[in-house]
Amino acid sequence: MAEDIKLMKGNEAIAHAAIRYGADGYFGYPITPQSEILETLMAEMPWETTGMVVLQAESEVAAINMVYGGAGTGKRVMTSSSSPGISLKQEGISYLAGAELPCLIVNVMRGGPGLGTIQPSQADYFQTVKGGGHGDYRLITLVPSSVQEMADFVGLGFDLAFKYNNPAIILADGIIGQMMEKVVMPPFRPRKTEAEIIAECPWAAQGKLKNRKANIITSLELDPAKMEENNIRFQAKYRKIEENEVRYEEFHCDDAEYLLVAFGSSARICQKVVEIARGEGIKLGLLRPITLWPFPTKAIAAYADKVKGMLSVELNAGQMVEDIRLAVNGKIKVEHFGRLGGIVFTPDEVLAALKEKLF
């Protein structure tokens, strides 16, 4: 069968992939630079074709709690926002993690803090990877560096969320959300039937179905001993995810003497940096985390015995660099380079920073 190829923005790819994946519901609120997700879904009117519910909620808080309710019934539900909006959703995200409910969240990052700028940023690393809401929880975090991955990670995010009964998030930056590329569209998947939901999600609250008890979905536990048991179970699940779901990509790393570590749009720029550096005789490689959690700690640690230094390249003041330093455990020098305020660095700037900080 011929491939279905379309030219579209990253945000539009998210919307089309959600429809094709068989998502049951999207609940969101507009905010730049991700508003095209909601706009595209409204324009496509999937409620008339697949039965997907698309709703602009009255606020970000309302949207995430609608996701909480939909996820509690075992439905494939999702939301999207940008940095300040994700901040408003944090309480609901923590509730979802505490109730062990699968869902998909999309964050197309903009600059901050505060209202900041509508220009691209990667400054929500701490908020997402470290768990921006309260309590000991983790989000499966997928980081696209192309419009194709924006589409692909919708299905992957939902699959991982349901595999581990845990929220998953696509953490994109404004460049990936707004740029246009060709996308091979994923095939259509049917929405789950009621019988499939019951089989896949026996915990789901499906009301008073015949011969089936009504389940109560909650993250509340007032007994400290039972709450500790819950948390111990969560941590065991997180360790399993760390063992099985680490994803990353290597670029010219086999003979590298220096290593760039970058994600999202920064990784795209760093590929050009590697090409320029090698043209100058510098053996430079790139490791691109595809999952920021679970983080490719072991892969990065292995390079501590092979390279002379690492440069963490991020559109922020230095966040991922902390995890890289923990991974190498002081064996080699690890430095950071980034731009702030929505300014995107050039390959030449990155290469100059590499020479200044590591040579």
Image (cartoon, grey):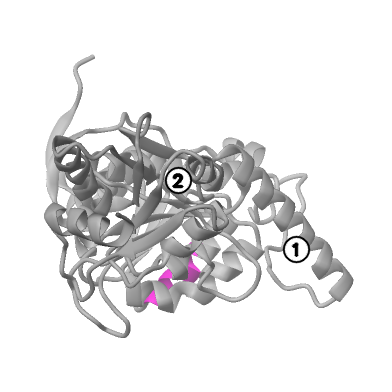
Kindly identify the residue that appears in the image at 18 percent across and 71 percent down.
Answer: 342
Q: Which residues are magenta?
A: 60-67
Q: Is residue 129 left or right of residue 19?
A: right
Q: Amino acid at mark 2?
A: Gly
Q: Report which quarter residue 198 is drawn in.
A: top right
Residue at position x 58%, y 60% in the image? 138
- The residue at 24%/61% (across/down) is 356
Residue lying furthest right: 225
Q: CA gap, disc 2 to disc 1? A: 23 Å
Whether residue 66 is in magenta: the answer is yes
Which residue shows up at 46% across the image and 38% down it?
306
The residue lying toward the viewer, choosing from 43 and 138, is: 138
Residue 274 horizontal side relative to residue 139, left or right: left
Rendering coords of residue 357 (x, y %): 30, 61
- Please tell me whether residue 284 belongs to the stretch shown in magenta: no
N-term-proximal mark, 2 vs 1: 2
Residue 22 makes an appearance in the image: no
Neighbor class of circle 2 (other Cα within 10 Å; few <14, some 14-19, many 20+) is many
User: In this rendering, would 309 be left or right of 220?
Assistant: left
Q: Position of residue 340 (x, y in %)?
A: 23, 73
Residue lying farthest front?
359
The secondary element bearing badge 1 is classed as helix
Q: Secondary structure at mark 2?
A: helix
Give the residue at mark 2: 157
| Nearest to the observer: residue 172 or residue 157 | 172
Q: Quadrant of residue 120?
A: bottom left
Residue 274, how many percent across, how many down?
A: 22, 41
> On the image, numbered disc 1 is attached to which residue?
231
**Amino acid marked by disc 1:** Asn
